[in-house]
């Protein structure tokens, strides 16, 4: 069992209710990373649902969560033969931190897409830059030891503010760190909710990194990923009036589109 498996584990406490011990290694500053919280909540939802994959998930973030004990409540809204829908809420000290609705189903690992957008031309991990623009933020180095991030040279220059124009478009690779089990971790599907929200906010290209809290994030699992590093592209369509959107697409080592996400967030503050 990898550290990621342990860090996202949930234990049943009563019918439809679970407890989790949120790992401080996934803190960003003093708040738990949102993708990590989604991964924990997904584990609880899949325990409650009759199907093994979270195919469509939508989360609202109401307040930051801290390291330590959390309670997770699940409510199966519908349990169909093809799709089951679960409402899930993560609380600390009785207060809701994140609430979500997860549609579960079973994807065929051998399915061949009728059509899928091709993966971007991203150099291999060995030719990308392993970099964390949040290195001066309290506890951020611990997070980068949990999640390995690699950026193309163009993205690297944008993150450092050295690009001719600050275009909010980043690409590279992401995977569970070698310390935590590496890219060949047992069930890469469990890593997907963290993968779509593990990267620095795309608005980082406009200045130094600052906390950019997510308000709402929806993501879709499009295929069962093969073990190995995931390729990503993250971009924004608009940054306006203190708000920005962020779209992340993720492909596995076979070039199969495995996840898509879109979130609305507050610009860094």
Image (tube, grey):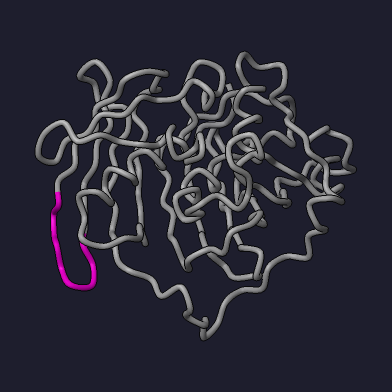
Residue at position x 64%, y 57% from top?
Answer: 228
Residue 51 at x, y = what percent? 26, 62
Q: Is residue 64 left or right of residue 205?
A: left
Q: Which residue occupies the foreground of this view, 163 or 118?
A: 118
Residue 118 highlighted magenta (yes or no): no
Farthest residue, direction bottom: 114
Q: Is residue 48 above or below residue 244?
A: below
Residue 141 at x, y = what percent? 67, 22
Q: Which residue occupies the foreground of this view, 185 or 268?
A: 185
- Magenta residues? 76-84
Q: Which residue occupies the foreground of this view, 142 or 102?
A: 142
Residue at position x 66%, y 54% from top?
Answer: 229
Q: Is residue 162 left or right of residue 239?
A: right
Residue 161 at x, y = what percent? 83, 33
Q: Which residue occupies the foreground of this view, 184 or 253?
A: 184
Residue at position x 50%, y 43% from top?
Answer: 194
Residue 60 at x, y = what percent? 34, 39
């Amino acid at each position: 069992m990898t550290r990621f498996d342990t860090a996202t584990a949930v234990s049943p406490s009563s019918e439809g209710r679970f407890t989790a011990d949120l790992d401080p290694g996934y803190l960003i500053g003093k708040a738990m990373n949102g993708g990590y919280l989604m991964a924990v909540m997904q584990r609880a939802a899949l325990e409650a649902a009759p199907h093994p994959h979270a195919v469509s998930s939508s989360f609202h973030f109401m307040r930051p969560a801290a390291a330590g004990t959390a309670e997770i409540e699940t409510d199966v809204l519908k349990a169909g033969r093809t799709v089951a829908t679960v409402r899930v809420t993560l609380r600390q000290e009785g207060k809701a931190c994140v609430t979500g609705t997860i549609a579960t189903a079973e994807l065929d690992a051998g399915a061949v897409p009728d059509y899928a957008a091709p993966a971007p031309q991203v150099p291999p991990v060995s030719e990308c830059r392993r970099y964390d623009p949040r290195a001066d933020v309290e506890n951020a180095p611990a997070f980068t030891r949990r999640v390995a991030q690699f950026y193309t040279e163009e993205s690297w220059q944008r993150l450092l503010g050295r690009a001719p124009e600050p275009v909010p478009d980043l690409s590279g690779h992401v995977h569970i760190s070698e310390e935590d089990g590496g890219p060949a971790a047992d069930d890469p599907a469990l890593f997907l909710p963290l993968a779509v929200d593990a990267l620095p906010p795309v608005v980082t290209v406009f200045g130094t990194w600052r906390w950019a809290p997510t308000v709402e994030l929806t993501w879709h699992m499009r295929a069962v990923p093969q073990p190995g590093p995931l390729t990503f592209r993250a971009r924004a369509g608009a940054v306006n009036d203190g708000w920005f959107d962020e779209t992340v697409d993720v492909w596995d080592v076979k070039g199969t589109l495995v996840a898509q996400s879109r979130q609305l967030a507050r610009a860094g503050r």
